[in-house]
Amino acid sequence: MSAARSLLNIIYNRRTIRKFKPVDVPEEIVNMIVEAGQRAPSYNQAYSFILVSDREKRKALEEICDAKYVSNASVIIVVCSDLNRVKKMFDYLSNNHVLMYDEYPVETIYSIFETGLATQNMIIAAEVLGFGTALLDCALFEAERVAALLELPKGVVPIGLLCIGEKDELPPKRPRWPLHMVLHKNKYREPNPYEVANYVEESSEMYDQEGYLMKYGGIPMKYKDYLAAKIERTKELERKYEKLSKFLKKAGFRI
Ligand SMILES: Cc1cc2nc3c(=O)[nH]c(=O)nc-3n(C[C@H](O)[C@H](O)[C@H](O)COP(=O)(O)O)c2cc1C
């Protein structure tokens, strides 16, 4: 099989791994993975990756994240969007640059996009090297506490927690929208209600067949009902979103 085909195979077959073997991943491997992240397309390289190896900090992070459904991740990296270093670069280049004025969202959008591109490169690099990954959103929702723990300056926002380790499970591939609903030809085609309903029903059924919620969360619910509950605009969700919005604003992120 050609190199291109085998890389495509790796991409097509990647699954989020939440159970890892308690085996160390050497630092050279971590460096290779992050270097792969750095090769992603980028304007400002507006990201920083905090490798959390300190025992106490890891424990604190695990408590903040409350992600008990992930076990034995050898490497934990807090993926951050970093406008702090970008601002320093702009300061060096100009005394009247866009980031001196808290006005426009462009650099914020770039930074989050670049962070995502780099993170995905890292995920694929880990797969190529034979490791599994899980990307968790808890670092974003607990951004303020994570920032305090890792001494992140203003402008550096945790976006995700990337767990890497040796795979100790092989879950089934999870569902995706059909290609024809994602790939539009020359103009946008509105999804019709039947297509949406079909996907929601079929994909939820796939998660239920995997026993996804029970396996990882001990949650005896149908996936569809779980999703519906998760997106409901409750007072608790409002509080959570308000808190995060306030933190992002304070960090200089224009969202
Ligand atoms: C931004 C982002 C945040 C995520 N956060 C979580 C998370 O907090 N917990 C989790 O178990 N999975 C999380 N995931 C992983 C998704 O649940 C997972 O990718 C999805 O179920 C599809 O499964 P697959 O990656 O195996 O195809 C996250 C994915 C993304 C892109």
Image (tube, grey):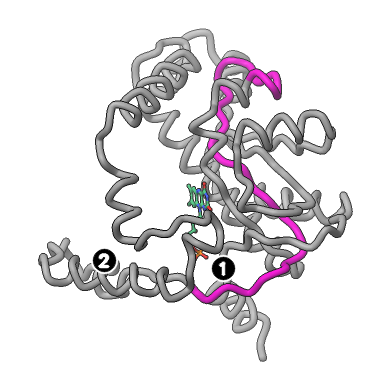
Is the N terminus in the top left, top right, bottom left or bottom right quadrant?
bottom right
Q: Secondary structure at mark 2?
A: helix
Label 2: which residue?
200
In the image, residue 132 sits, relative to residue 8, either above or below, namely above
Classify residue 223 by image quadrant.
bottom left
Q: Amino acid at mark 2?
A: Val
> Mark 2, residues whose alpha carbon is within 10 Å: few (<14), some, or many (≥20)?
some
The residue at label 1 has a CB less than 8 Å from ligand 1: yes
Seen as rendered, the residue at the extreme top is 95
Residue 160 pos. (x, y %): 56, 41
Q: Secondary structure at mark 1?
A: loop
Label 1: which residue?
15
The residue at 57%/77% (across/down) is 8
Mark 2 / mark 1, whichever is N-terminal: 1
In the image, residue 54 sits, relative to residue 133, either above or below, namely above
Q: Nearer the viewer, residue 6 or 139?
A: 139
In the image, residue 179 sits, relative to residue 237, either above or below, namely below
